[in-house]
Image (tube, grey):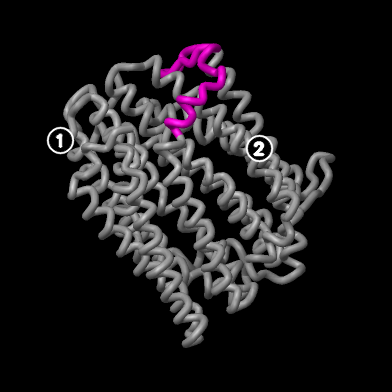
Amino acid sequence: MPVSLAREESPRVVWALAWPVILALLSESVVALVDMLMVARLGATAVAAVGVGSQILGAVTLTMTAVATGTIALVARHVGAGARDEASQTLAQSMIAGAALGAVMVVPVVLWAEPIVLAFGVTPEVAEVGARFVRFVMLSVPSSAVLFVFGSGLRASGDTRTPLVIGIFVNVLNVAGNWLLIFGHLGFPALGVAGSAVATAFAYTSGVAFACLLLVRGRLRLRPRRADFRPRGDVIRRVLRVGYPAGIEQALMQLGFLLYLVFAARYGTDAIAAYFIGVRILMLSFLPGFGFAAASSTLVGQHLGAGNPARAESAGWRSTCMSVVMMSTSGLVIFLLAEPIAHLFVDEPPVVSGAVAFIHMLAISQPFMAMDFTLGGALRGAGDTRFPLVSVLIAFYVVRLGTSFVVAGILHLPLVWLWGTIIGDYIVRAALKSWRFRQGVWRTIQV
């Protein structure tokens, strides 16, 4: 029986689902930090190039959210209703859809890598290095898409530990590959920025091989049969019908980040480098929110599948409260340590100053981010994937980007004011999602 249905919700039950996700994402964040520390030894141009390239990679990868979100909602409902065979089939079909979508997304990005990087408003030198990084790192997309969907399906079934094991395996390979290929240790070629991209592609491909081995052994909570991997248009369409608003949401988010970076680029390359350093550091404080979002998605979806919306609502609010406490605490710690951490990456005063200011603004936003992440997870687990899209349009585009235009384009205020627009963005998101979840429309949504 899944963890979430074994007993009435308690903090221990929520935590049992959340901590493996938090630890898996912590592992990814440590890899991102180590990667950036290695790249930082190549200079500010390399940091900005990899930062922009990673943003592009994130945009491509997060389009897989359409598949992953539909997988979460359907698998959780099937598991809650006791229909494990249907849940396993949904996982298999979602993996096929993720691989196909990932392969399609790679082609245009590889062909137009340099114009895409230039669209971020960077210098030609940064664009040249960033395009080289992007072309190599795109090789990782089909594999990372499969792992993303695979992990989402297992977490929706209540198994959050297997994705953790696979994630650690991938991250260890990634770090080792970075060390070998960026600097040319142990006889390997010193590829610089491109070496980081090649290491990423190799690590994710190996992760897919590991996941397939686990499936073949048949010891996972979901056990797709060989026949489940024969393409089923009806199942894939159902997954996409539920998940496509989340895919559009993420696409708009990435476009919004691009526009936000265009405003930051008005302050120079140092501001861009500061932005990406700050994001890498603050990802550590985001982790509880992502973990509790996964827990709330699983619990809400499974309880709705079992016909118990009251317990689903209780699980959503409990997860949110725990997330707020943990993210507020982590935000305070990073706020206090912002300057010494920034100095780990670079010693250039303008970059350090910009990164510290950015970190401070994100730290202040932590309680609101916690509500945004966790209640968003609860709504998506219920299949209510359209309202989070609406909240992004209002909070990100109207509040953050609208204010950024005034700050950077009209008033020409100092950089710290641009970073401060993030606070208003997340306050509005938290308010909108709290209202939606309390309203209860999600209880009656059919997936």
Give left or right: position of 97 versus 298. Answer: right
Q: Is residue 33 above or below residue 351?
A: above
Magenta-span inclusion, residue 220: yes
Give left or right: position of 132 versus 251. Answer: right
Q: Is residue 156 above or below residue 374?
A: above
Question: Can residue 178 be spotted in the picture?
Answer: no
Q: Residue at x 58, y 62 (%)?
A: 344
Specify the segment rendered in magenta: 217-239
Q: Nearer the viewer, residue 364 or 147?
A: 147
Q: Residue at x 41, y 64 (%)?
A: 396
Q: Secondary structure at mark 2?
A: helix
Position in image of residue 16 (x %, y %): 31, 32
Give left or right: position of 214 versus 161. Answer: right
Work out which quarter of the rendered image holds the N terminus and state it: top left
Work out which quarter of the rendered image holds the C terminus and state it: top left
State which tag comes first along the sequence, 1 or 2.
2
Position in image of residue 333 (x %, y %): 38, 59
Q: Nearer the viewer, residue 46 or 103?
A: 103
* Amino acid type, label 2: Ala
Position in image of residue 318 (x %, y %): 21, 42
Mark 1: few/some/many CA within 10 Å (<14, 14-19, 20+): few
Q: Quadrant of residue 125?
A: bottom right
- Circle 2 residue: 103
- Circle 1 residue: 310
